[in-house]
Amino acid sequence: MLDCIVRTVMEEGVLSLWRGNGSSVIRYYPSVALNFSLKLRICTGISYTATFKMVTFCLGLPASLHGMIVHRGLYFGGFDTIKDGMAENSEAEVPLWKRWVVAQAVTTSAGLLSYPLDTVRRRMRMQSALEKPMYRSTLDCWRRIYKTEGFTSFYRGAMSNIFRSTGAAAVLVLYDEVKKFMNWSGL
């Protein structure tokens, strides 16, 4: 094996050892990012298990799933639908700035439309540390928040979500550019 490495370096140069490695690098970084974020969540979760109750975790699961489905459906589906509708014909290229405006509008809208679901999810999760849960179910949480705090309480803190949506919009446009660059038109 050493002979192969030495011969390759002599005949083709040092950089030839990394030829074809670009796709591995592109695949590796998201994988590492995911691994580290999962590691952090698992370590945080391990320290949390002393106060964790499976029953309250399961109570918050429907709210989490509803929020993810609504948000991601609007986020991905809305961007592609509006972007494709803006093209005059199937071959037309929508300018980058227009795609960013669409991505920003879609991301902000998805965040605002799904924010009440996120509020309920957070409330359900926060009660897991309580001795006696405040809410019996996701529906009960909806009812009590609306009855005691009013409709606007579902949107408390939504402004920070709007500011965060700029990064998510940039990710949509960047992914679109990478698809175009890599010729992944079917994705």
Image (tube, grey):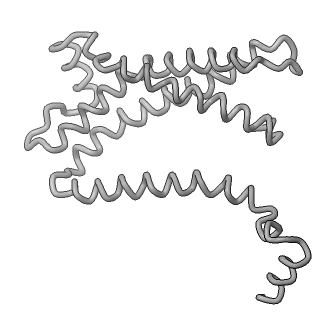
In-front residue for pair 14/28? 14
Displayed quadrant of residue 82: top right
Displayed quadrant of residue 84: top right
* Quadrant occupied by the N terminus: bottom right
Tell whether 186 sits left or right of 154.
Answer: right
Residue 181 % position (x, y): 80, 38
In-front residue for pair 34/10? 10
Q: In the image, what residue occupies the spot 35% across and 19% down?
A: 158
Residue sitting at the far left: 131
Residue 149 % position (x, y): 18, 13
Residue 123 % position (x, y): 24, 31
Q: In the image, what residue occupies the spot 20% across and 52% down?
A: 52
Q: In the image, what residue occupies the spot 57% across and 55% down?
A: 31
Residue sitting at the far right: 11
Q: Is residue 83 above or below residue 39?
A: above
Residue 22 % position (x, y): 74, 56
Q: Is residue 57 above or below residue 136?
A: below
